[in-house]
Amino acid sequence: MASTSSTTGGFEYAPAPESRSIVDIKPSYGLFVDGDFVDGQGSSFKTINPATEETLAEVAEASEADVDLAVRAARRAFRGWSRMSGRERAKYLFRIARIIQERGRELAVLESIDNGKPIKESRDVDVPIVAAHFFYYAGWADKLEYAGLGANPRPLGVAGQVIPWNFPLLMLAWKVAPALACGNTVVLKPAETTPLTALLFAEICQQADLPPGVVNIVTGAGATGQAIVAHPDVDKVAFTGSTEVGKAIARTVAGSDKRVTLELGGKAANIVFDDAPIDQAVEGIVSGIFFNQGHVCCAGSRLLVQESVADEVLARLKRRMGTLRVGDPLDKNTDIGAINSSEQLARIRELSDVGEAEGAERWAPACDLPSSGFWFPPTVFTGVTQAHRIAREEVFGPVLSVLTFRTPAEAVEKANNTPYGLSAGVWTEKGSRILHMASQLRAGVVWANTFNKFDPASPFGGFKESGYGREGGRQGLAAYLQGGDL
Amino acid sequence: MPTTALAAYSEVTASEASLRRFLHGLPGVDQVGAEARAAGLGTRSIKTTAKAWALDLAIRMVDLTTLEGQDTPGKVRALASKALRPDPADPSCPSVAAVCVYGDLVGEVKAIVGSEVNVAAVATAFPSGRASMPVKLADTRDAVANGADEIDMVIDRGAFLAGHYLQVFEEIVATREACVRPDGSHAHLKVIFETGELQTYDNVRRASWLAMLAGADFIKTSTGKVQPAATLPVTLVMLEAVRDFREATGVQIGVKPAGGIRTAKDAIKYLVMVNEVAGDDWLDPDWFRFGASTLLNDLLMQRTKMTTGRYSGPDYFTLD
């Protein structure tokens, strides 16, 4: 394991930290309501840098009354925003997309500081896809009649959106861009551990002259989210997060006329056949589970490898894991950053200990972890069976469970044998097998000879306990338009 | 040299059919994945001490090359002097690995560099490889007789693309025999694939294994006469091949990307790739080379910047 200082022999990569001076973090933040930052009526909470545990800022915790103000502002803004021509709305969205690109470095650095993800990912993955998402939906804003959802699709009204901490800005983009393109206004709550990029996005909305109230951002924890979801004047709820909270939301909105989309957990199978391009499959396994510290709902957390190549694949995987660099998220050479919170670290540790106790063999490369902050080494469990908890429960960390199979039918059976169904990966050089597997796997996304690739034009969403509704692409419009259920 | 592990592969090369079965049984290379991996390694940020270390290593790995019809004794002597002392202003600057010229000019280079820097000669009807076998072997023997330390041969791409793998294999074996000197030692054999003509990464992987089984000391991407020449993904596939070959046989083979590597920044990307794909053992001029000419001056310019903190103009570095 190459940590902050490489141990790979002569070629020691010197620290190459991205400067954080580009970001100006204020000591405290209020709520973004009706186009302005306002003080909350509730208490406040701290957001910290998970790599150092230093406090970054004090953030307002929105009370029920604050949420009510935000929803009222969104309702007032809805009148003008929904009647504005699609072409005009598109101008705002294009402008936001361009500002995101212009301020990309600032957003990337802030995301890495608040979330713990490596700068190479926030810089090369998160922020570019965020901008792409706004550009993509900006393009739809004046073409909604041609989306295949009926002749005159109409917006729903006020969308209440609650997003997770793993991709704070990207999940915001997935929620806000289509909602705005379709003429809805939004009240969005970022996760309590990662509110800062959403608040910077609020500044971007001001910079883009977005009409007040079209985007409202209220920070807080579960109670704030609950207040949004339960608010009687919210027409649409969009949530990304854990299956447990998703179920609670579904119960809350049951019996109301609120529309809901839920994007929840996953336990994706990454299936490697014996005729796979082995070196690229190993890369796909690595990016499938160690991308973003494994804090990815569609992570390839279950490796299903054909028994005839299992030893070879595992040997190569372990060698490759030895070159992963864990450490300072702002170092441009860091591959794996910090775990987002102590709570999440505790959960990863607990499930890993259970894996060991249940008899699976645990392996991680030798690894110097920083002394402060929340860290977990990239870890692989072999000898895992369907009966192990680490093969069934979402760990949401850099922990891979390896299972084997003998035939394609067995691979399908094991891959589908999970309460989740968000994503899957298939690795084979045989095109016909890819198509067959894709038709058999009950997962919203099936990647072939790649993994964790995202594009705004491609719909994303789950089967079973991974949720319902689709985000992205033309399908993503249906979640924010009336008559969109056709 | 063949070890017992390598001898186990003798069945593979016993017939055209078995060699084809073996080469086509190697795991495929997914183009998109290989290119993504190469691009990912290219984003490593090598600064300060790591950069200084890498620049010196890169200089020591350069095969300073001139392969033009207009090469004269004067031109190659100038290049040979540069190879010895790349930066006349700084005696701490290391020499390059070798000077690479056509076979008839080996003696001119040798007269300048002696045994301090190797002399490499291209042979076997470089760059096209289109000549009969006796001609190619005579070309090789001539260069060896002139004192070449290393021979850079080209494979017959026509034969390879026609699927005549055994013919390519036997040509490499024969060329290797032609590298043997009267005293029994042999000139190091680099085998050039001209990957720009083989085109697919699957072909690059097959050619790598074919050449390694035939006794190549080095596998090399390109002649520099065909575009594209060396690329990061092609070199990635070749580094994976030498890594896997050593694991299978215990025999270590060198890699030489050649052509198109012009900047220090590019060279460092290659070194990062060597480090993370093949490993530390290949970070040595004995096991990794750059076939280049203009690259050297950029390495020198960056090196001077590291030591003085300033960029000086191109006129502060010799043009040869």
Image: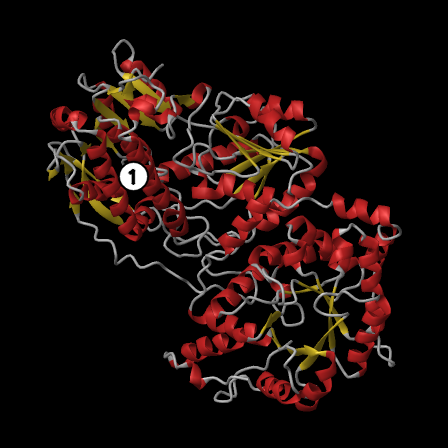
Res B186 seen here: no
- Which residue matches tag 1? A193
* Label 1 CA crowd tier, 10 Å (few <14, some 14–19, many 20+): many
Q: Residue furthest top?
A: A255
Q: Tell me if B260 is positioned left or right of B198 in this view.
A: left
Res A142 seen here: yes
Residue ID at (27%, 32%): A176
Q: Residue type at mark 1: give it.
A: Thr
The image shows residue B293 at horizontal and vertical percentages of 57, 75
Q: Considering only vertical position in the picture, is A413 above or below B25?
A: above
The image shows residue B284 at horizontal and vertical percentages of 62, 70
Q: Considering only vertical position in the picture, is B298 above or below A36?
A: below
Q: Considering only vertical position in the picture, is A415 above or below B247?
A: above
Residue ID at (74%, 67%): B217
The image shows residue A376 at horizontal and vertical percentages of 45, 44
Q: Considering only vertical position in the picture, is A354 above or below B147?
A: above
